[in-house]
Amino acid sequence: MELATRLRKYAVEVGGREQLAIQVFADALEVIPRALAESCGLDAIDTLVDLRSKHEKKNVGLGIDVYKARVHDLGALGIIEPVRVKKQAIQSASEAAEMILRIDDIIASRGKPASPAGGGMGGGMDM
């Protein structure tokens, strides 16, 4: 949740189309707390709104305590997430998204006619 919060703030600074991409990436990062909230019977929207507002107030250690179905300081409960694992997960997800976008570009470009300036007989002469 903290990374998503920081990305949203950064997106505003960037602006333009890039801002939209960054915001969507932040949304994707919130899939995990949303799934945790739903899994333990919490209202996912209310829980995400609560988490966002608390993270914006610098309560960076807050997350979802699935045993008691509440937002709580996970560090106080002894729950930590290694940075190395998060970095690898984010990197892998980013690479997968990039591959999908490249494949989409390739498929989209197949439907476009070839550029006339690139070769062929050219000249507009009928044979």
Image (tube, helix red, strand yellow):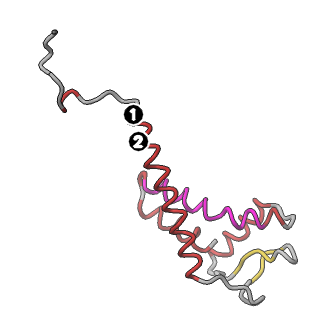
Percent position of residue 34, x then y? 73, 63
| Residue 101 screen position, x and y as percent | 46, 49
Q: Amino acid type of disc 2? A: Ile
Residue at horizontal 54%, vertical 60%?
Answer: 25
Magenta span has 26? yes
Callout 1, which amino acid?
A: Arg
Where does label 1 land, which residue? 110
Q: For mark 2, what is the residue?
A: 106
In which quadrant of the rendered image does the N terminus lie?
A: bottom right
Q: CA distance from mark 2 to mark 1?
A: 6 Å
Q: Is residue 51 left or right of residue 101?
A: right
Q: Secondary structure at mark 2?
A: helix
Give me the disc on residue 89: none
Instruction: Identify the residue shown where x is 47% and y is 67%.
Output: 10
Q: As drawn, which residue projects farthest toward the top?
A: 127
Q: Residue 83 lies in magenta, yes or no?
A: no
Location of the C terminus (image quadrant): top left
**Total marks in image:** 2
Asked if disc 2 and disc 1 are in contact, CB closer than 8 Å, the reply is: yes
The crowd level at tag 2 (other Cα within 10 Å; few <14, some 14-19, many 20+) is few
> Could you tell me which residue is drawn at 53 percent across and 66 percent down?
92
Q: What residue range appears in magenta?
A: 18-36
Quarter of the image for residue 43 reads: bottom right
Give SS at disc 1. Answer: helix
